Image (cartoon, rainbow, N blue to C red):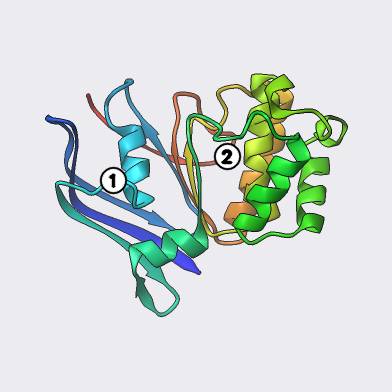
Amino acid sequence: MIKGIAIRSLALARGDRVLIEGLDLDVASGEAVVLSGPNGAGKTSLLRAVAGLIRPLSGRIAIEGDLGEIPLEDAIAREAHLIGHQDALKTARRAWDEVLFQVRWTGGTADSAKAACARMGLNALLDLPVRKLSAGQRRRLALIRLSASPRGLWLLDEPLAPLDRVQRARFGELMIEHLARGGLILAAAHDPLPVKSRTIEIAA
């Protein structure tokens, strides 16, 4: 299980533009850290770097486990969820088929998917194609795998943006439970998370 993230002297670029330089950041088990800052400052790029999708210009990202450091690729493949700014759902699929595919792909089961759908209030929508769901409903569909196939590290890009007040509170309950189990959350967000968190400002 992931126990912490240690980022040291990290530099990231997009094209020819350096976004982040000399960043040091630690995230511990049971902690939520919010990346704040203007659009284009590099918050999403930092999440993608931790997820192994962007190679840093320099610096190091270390994932600590029970027995020491875990190779980044192994840690992400087995112990992390990345929920991007876009929901990454196949819009032509039935909602249930899309949920089941994503949950099984990340290590969950049909039973855990059904339970998560019920908790997120989506049971009545599961026979609809994804394209007919609202933005908030699609976001809830994307978030289901967080509880249906538990993993220690949640990397979240604006997770609350399309959710209404009730759904934000419901997702907040899931986040509290995740942190209580020793999970980690690293989130890029303009809105405050509905859990106790530490904010890191990413400057433009």
The amino acid type of the residue labelled 2 equals: Val
Q: Mark on residue 161? A: none
Q: Is residue 74 above or below residue 135?
A: below
* In this view, the mark in front (2 or 1): 1
Q: Left or right of 96: which side holds 108?
A: left
- Horizontal and vertical percent position of residue 72: 35, 62
Q: Is residue 61 above or below residue 143?
A: below
Q: Which residue is mark 1?
A: 54
| Residue farthest to the front, as pictured | 92
Q: How many marks?
A: 2
Q: Who's the residue at 48% across and 52% down the image?
A: 31
Q: Who's the residue at 16% across and 53% down the image?
A: 59
Q: Left or right of 42: which side holds 93?
A: right
Closer to us: 92 or 1? 92
The amino acid type of the residue labelled 1 equals: Ile
Q: Left or right of 13: which side holds 123?
A: right
Q: Left or right of 160: which side holds 37?
A: left
- Horizontal and vertical percent position of residue 176: 63, 47
User: How packed is label 2: few (under 14 Cα within 10 Å), some, or many (20 or more)?
Assistant: some
State the CA–CA distance, disc 2 to disc 1.
28 Å
Q: Who's the residue at 39% across and 54% down the image?
A: 27
**Helix or strand or loop: what does disc 1 sit on?**
loop
**Helix or strand or loop: what does disc 2 sit on?**
loop
Is there a contact, CB below 8 Å, between mark 2 and mark 1?
no
Q: Which residue is mark 2?
A: 195
Snapshot quadrant of residue 46: top left
- Horizontal and vertical percent position of residue 41: 27, 27
Q: Who's the residue at 46% across and 65% down the image?
A: 2
Closer to us: 110 or 117? 110
User: How packed is label 1: few (under 14 Cα within 10 Å), some, or many (20 or more)?
Assistant: some
- Horizontal and vertical percent position of residue 75: 43, 64
Quadrant in which the C terminus appears: top left
